[in-house]
Image (cartoon, grey):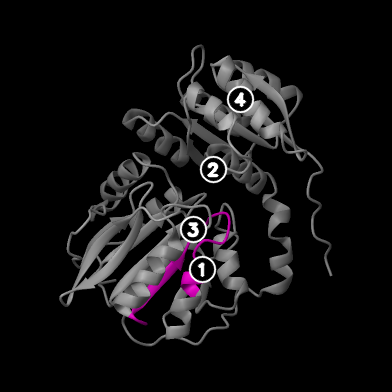
Amino acid sequence: MVAAPEIPAVLRVMVVDDSSVVRGFLTRFLEEDPAIRVIIAAPDGRQALKEMMLTPPDVAILDIDMPVMDGLTALPLMLERQPGLPVIIASTRTRENAALALTCLRMGAAEVMAKPTAQEMAAQDIALPGEGFRAALLAKVKSLGNIGAATAHLDQAIDEKTASAPAYTGRVEAVAICSSTGGPQALLTLFAGLSGPLPVPVFITQHMPATFTTVLAENIAAVSGLACHEAVEGEGVRSGRIYIAPGDYHLLVRVVAGSKTITLGRQPPENFCRPAADTMLRSLAAAYGPRVLTLVLTGMGADGLAGCRALHALGAPVVAQDKQSSIVWGMPGAVAGAGLCTDVLPLAEMPALLRRYTGGAP
């Protein structure tokens, strides 16, 4: 048996932000965890590039708006200098910066987070441990920093080429897609690979904050030519449309007077997420029964596992992205490890799979 790679004793993190206050808060938040040490705290991209040559980090947190060299300019140079470096884009929640953050993801960044203001960070500083931005930041850094080791145990337990769930032979009436870290890139690739609209509605829960999901929907529409928008409270479900859960709202589908209608919920987060995949999948199981195809794409954590379990129990098909094409094999690995998948596939094979299950044109 091949030994699992060792998890680094200490994750070395680089923080790049022009605000000394923000750098200080980020450093304090991170180093509260004994498994993390901030080895570089740079005010701009140029300084970061110099320092990472001497002490390569395991994970980088990168601001977009900075003097001397901004994050958009620095990112490709960082990845050229240290290929495979997981970079988290920490951006303010403006529409312009959300668009730039999506561009950074297409350029190779691993994740994007909405950065609080210095005042909001100060409020987090006195909050209970494990709440809000600080908890999300720690989780993402540790997940990305342990990419090789975090799922090593799953490699020994799962033969990714063999699906344990029974095959589904009918056509589905809806598609559900769940994703997190690496999800925006995966979604853009997936929908760019389709040759036209699907004859069923598609519902997406991607773990992203408000404004960022708006821009993601616009990007999917642009690369695919398909009708894609953030879901709206009370709108009727239509075939051929792609609905994305808005940031900070759960996406649910209800049957009202025989018609399927979208509901947006502010119920508490599930799996520390809002929107949450489990919330969406449970509502789709109630609305469509087994006639839902679920794709679980790259992402950290296990959101979607409980919802896929409910759909699997009804006989619905569940497909996970394989580890090789995932940035983080947490969400898809959890579903595959539970034996719920009819297929575990590379992302490149999923457009054809969507056509096969929905009866759309090739």
Tell me the quarter of the picture where residue 42 sits: top right
Q: How many marks?
A: 4
Tell me if mark 2 has few (under 14), some (14-19) or many (20+) residues whose alpha carbon lies within 10 angstroms of its own. Answer: many
User: Of label 1 and label 4, which has the lower sequence position?
Assistant: 4
Give x and y (percent) for residue 185.
44, 48
Residue topped by disc 1: 320
- Give the residue number, with chain letter if any, for mark 4: 25
Rate crowding at label 3 as few (under 14), some (14 to 19) or many (20 or more) other CA atoms within 10 Å: some
Q: Which residue is mark 2?
A: 110
Frontmost of labels 2 and 4 is 4
Q: Mark 1 to mark 4: distance in Å?
A: 37 Å
User: Residue drawn at (47%, 25%), measured in percent from left and top?
Assistant: 117
Of tags 1 and 4, the one toward the viewer is 4
User: Element under label 4?
Assistant: helix
- Tell me the residue that label 3 is attached to: 270
- Measure the alpha-carbon separation of dots 2 and 4: 22 Å
Of residues 84 and 268, the one drawn nearer to the viewer in this rendering: 268
Which residue appears at 52% of the width and 61% of the height?
303
